């Protein structure tokens, strides 16, 4: 997962973080330390990129097709029941919702793509404000692209992943709702999806499975954020240590001779 440059005050360019290109299942041995979320503060609901908060903190964005289970997943990750509003109506989230986590990074809840109720045909397929955010937000560290594991590959998901790839937006795949169908169906759907996108890559993107109902995947997803934050903090520390120290004044500087 390549990290884009963070060209903002207080945030240094994080080194490239490499995760093995494989699907991580819930019965896999833990790979990451888990980030502890001690606080979650709502910042704003932004209609466009210009309305988003300043770029002083790293951001991790979550997006998927309408009704993919994004809101349930965000509440599950944050350990809060009402961080994101869960609705039975597809396309409910229409704004870019930003939360500051642990006062050190931001979780960004992006509107789902697809056909929102009441929208004209194709008008809500891909939110242009969201695409602008994904392409131009300089402090965006990674996108968690949510795909419903209970379904075979959907054309709109494949189209969106291709867009992320061609725009070089860093992302990981997250296959949701693994509790809704038998395990062999989940694996077959994931394999079919990965086969569909295989021509886009020399190595397939990293993918995870998760379920807000069973608790599957929380450690792994938060581990991605923890790994990124650890790398950023290490880079900051290294830069501070390498920064030239101001020269001390000579002891006799103010002497009259």
Image: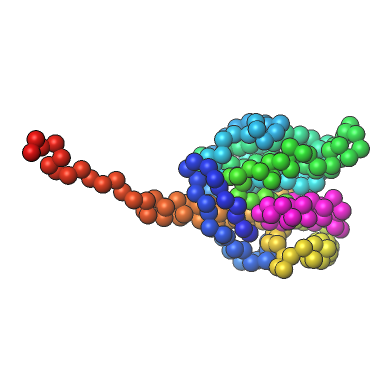
Q: Nearer the viewer, residue 203 or 255?
A: 255
Horizontal side of residue 248 vs 184, given as left or right: left
Residue 173, given in percent of the width and then of the height, sits at 72, 56
88 in relation to 199, above or below: above
Quadrant of the frame with the N terminus: bottom right
What residue is drawn where x is 86% and y is 54%? 154
| Residue 95 place in picture, x, y as percent | 72, 33
Residue found at the very far right of the displayed protein: 121
Q: Where does the image place residue 25, in percent across and percent down from the top left?
A: 70, 63
The residue at the point 90 percent across, 34 percent down is 120
Residue at the bottom extreme of this rendering: 202
What residue appears at the point 14 percent right and 43 percent down from the top-left corner? 251
Q: Is residue 164 magenta?
A: yes
From this viewpoint, which residue is outermost toward the left? Answer: 257
Res 87 visible: no
The magenta segment: 146-174
* Whether residue 133 can be seen here: yes
Label total for image: 0
């Amino acid at each position: 997962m390549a990290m884009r440059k963070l060209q903002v005050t207080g945030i240094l360019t994080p080194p490239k973080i490499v995760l093995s290109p494989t699907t991580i299942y819930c019965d896999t041995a833990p790979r990451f330390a888990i980030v502890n979320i001690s606080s979650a503060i709502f910042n704003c609901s932004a209609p466009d990129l210009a309305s988003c908060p300043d770029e002083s903190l790293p951001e991790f964005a979550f997006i998927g097709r309408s009704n993919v289970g994004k809101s349930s997943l965000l509440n599950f990750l944050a350990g809060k029941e009402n961080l994101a509003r869960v609705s039975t109506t597809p396309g409910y989230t229409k704004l870019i919702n930003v939360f500051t986590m642990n006062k050190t990074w931001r979780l960004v809840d992006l509107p789902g793509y697809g056909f929102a109720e009441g929208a004209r045909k194709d008008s809500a397929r891909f939110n242009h404000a969201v695409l602008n955010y994904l392409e131009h937000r300089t402090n965006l560290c990674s996108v968690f692209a949510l795909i419903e594991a209970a379904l075979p590959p959907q054309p709109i998901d494949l189209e969106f992943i291709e867009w992320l790839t061609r725009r070089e937006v860093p992302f990981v795949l997250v296959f949701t709702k693994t509790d809704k169908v038998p395990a062999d169906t989940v694996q077959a759907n994931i394999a079919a999806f990965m086969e569909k996108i295989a021509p886009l890559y020399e190595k397939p993107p990293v993918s995870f499975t998760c379920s807000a109902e069973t608790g599957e995947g929380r450690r792994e997803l938060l581990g991605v954020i923890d790994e990124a934050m650890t790398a950023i903090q290490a880079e900051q520390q290294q830069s501070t240590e390498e920064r030239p120290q101001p020269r001390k004044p000579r002891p006799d500087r103010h002497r009259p001779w």
